[in-house]
Amino acid sequence: MIPVRHKLLAALAAVPLLLLAAATPAPAAAAGYVALGDSYAAGVAAGAYDPASGDCHRSTRAYPALLAAQSASAPFLDLACNGSTAESVLSGQVPSVPAGTGLVTLTAGGNDLGFADAVIGCLQPFTTDAKCDQALDHSAQVLRDDLPGRLDRLLTGIGQAAPGARVVVTGYPDLLHTGTTCFVGTDARRKRFDALIDQVDELIRRQAQAHGDRFADPRAAFADHEICAAHGPEWITRIVLTPLWESFHPTADGQSRGYLPVVAAAARG
């Protein structure tokens, strides 16, 4: 809500969810707003990528760039990068956050759970329920045993880097609509996949609140716009063969109409 590319190519129909290489941190500079996080914050699949961002694939249509444009007078530093985990955000992005930053947004945690393996095991054709269960069981174990500590350390690091900043931590949208006929996994698999995302979001919400930060929940905004939605246009990409790394990410509409309103509301307080 990301090598993985080789595994995806070997699986033919497999797709990355949130993984690629992390970027070299940008030099510290004065900034009113700093964006941190993974491919969902970078805007993978939204297009209009900044060439200077390289494999981070930061998009001018991602919610951080759109949020920054709403207050164009404030300096903006975008450090979000495709492939980042909670730990790589802490080690590779947080050190570049200026101490005087007023606002920080963060989307992170999905890559830590091995969502790419879960997508391969659950949503590509001809996979077994056993393979899907194995992938989701692993993700659930990391969620239970490892991710709470990783998020705690990350949010602590952000607070230490920019002690006066308002921090907005986002969750992930449910990727898959259930109760419909669809060729992306079975309905049972889609339900379990979304249930895992809901558990991730609940953990992120609790950790944010424990640190005095704000939680922006995009799930309601994305409702009826998930993959396999019966009516509304889908704001999540399905399998994209060229380039593969855009698969299962929010579209430009997902960024502007799904993420942006809830993040902007949380930032305003």
Image (cartoon, rainbow, N blue to C red):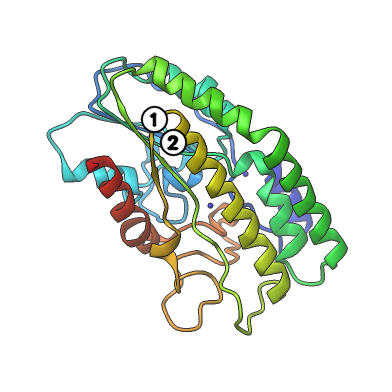
**Do the residues under discs 2 and 1 have CB atoms within 8 angstroms?**
yes
Image location (x, y in percent) of residue 130:
87, 62
Q: Give the class, few, some or many, for how many residues have Cα within 10 Å of label 2's Cα (few <14, many ≥20).
A: few
Mark on residue 209? 2
Image: 238 above or below 63? below
Give the residue at x 78% y 55%. Answer: 10
Image location (x, y in percent) of residue 244:
60, 56
Q: Which amino acid is tagged 1?
A: Gly
Q: Which of 126 and 162 is in front in this view?
A: 162
Give the residue at x 66% y 73%. Answer: 184
Identify the image quadrant of the C terminus.
top left
Element assignment for label 2? helix
Quarter of the image where one finds residue 141:
top right
Image: 148 above or below 15? above
Give the residue at x 32% y 47%. Answer: 263
Residue matched to label 1: 212
Image location (x, y in percent) of residue 215:
40, 43
Image: 18 above or below 220? above
Image location (x, y in percent) of residue 3:
71, 39
Q: Which of 135 and 151 is in front in this view?
A: 151
Q: Which amino acid is tagged 2?
A: Gln
Q: Is residue 1 left or right of residue 166?
A: right
Q: Which of 154 and 7 is in front in this view?
A: 154
Q: Is residue 25 visible?
A: no
Q: Distance between the residues labelled 2 and 1?
A: 5 Å
Mark on residue 99? none
Q: Is residue 152 left or right of residue 16?
A: left
Element assignment for label 1? loop
Give the residue at x 39% y 61%. Answer: 254
